[in-house]
Amino acid sequence: MKVYIKIKNIIKTMILLLLIIILSLWLPIKLAIKKDMVDNQEYFICEKVSTTGFEWIVVDGNYNYTGYIELKGKIPLEEYRNYYPSIRFNKFVCLGQIVGEDIFDGYKYLIFNVDRWEVLYPVQRDSLIPEFLLPKYGFTFWDTIQ
């Protein structure tokens, strides 16, 4: 009888752990937005780049500008500096205002103060977990630990 109760408790614990893992794969901690959901604020859609001198490049926005940009304020992924390695290749909507411009190595770039940022739908990942198992609608807990 005691063995039966122990096996039953082990099975319940395993089911609970499996449920927690599945939920953590699908419950978003940061939702993605679509471009048409951006309100009438000043915004740029930026991607992270690896170049000397610049970390961000503008790919779209409500200004006629594409090129390098210096972000100030609430920079996307900054508070998670070492955590989101699998999702750093996404596009981010940076809402705020232009505070200036400067020149670096002969290239003009803008300085943009970010009030808030959002990830652009669909979320892309460089992950060991197959893409079809992960949601496209936001970042999950698993994105922070890979």
Image: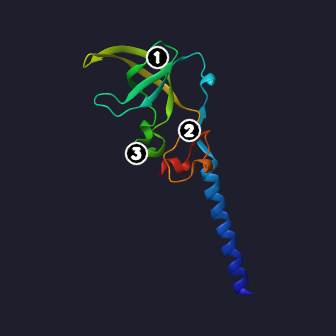
> Which sits earlier in the primary sequence, circle 3 or circle 2?
3
Tag 3, which secondary structure? loop
Q: Name the residue under label 3.
A: 82
Q: Does 94 appear above or below 103?
A: below
Q: As drawn, is 116 to the left or to the right of 49?
A: right
Q: What is the spatial separation of the Cα atoms under label 3 and label 1, in whole angstroms?
A: 27 Å
Residue at screen point 35% across, 14% down: 101
* Residue drawn at the location 69% of the way across and 79% of the way down: 7
Q: Which amino acid does label 2 sit on?
A: Val
Residue furthest to the left in view is 105
Q: Nearer the viewer, mark 2 or mark 1?
A: 2
What amino acid does circle 3 point to? Asn
Q: In which quarter of the image is residue 78?
A: top left
What residue did someone put label 2 on? 123
Which residue is at the front of the view, 135 or 100? 135
Image quadrant assignment for residue 13: bottom right
Q: What residue appears at the point 49 percent right and 13 percent down from the top-left corner?
A: 63
User: Where in the figure is residue 16, as x and y percent of width and height?
Assistant: 67, 64
Residue 34 percent coordinates (x, y): 61, 28
Tell me if mark 2 has few (under 14), some (14-19) or many (20+) residues whose alpha carbon lies within 10 angstroms of its own. many
Residue 74, image x, y percentages: 45, 29
Q: Name the residue under label 1.
A: 97
Badge 2 vs badge 1, beta-carbon distance below 8 Å: no
Q: Residue at x 31, y 31 (%)?
A: 51
Nearer the observer, disc 3 or disc 2?
A: 2
**Distance from Cα at disc 2 to Cα at disc 1:** 25 Å
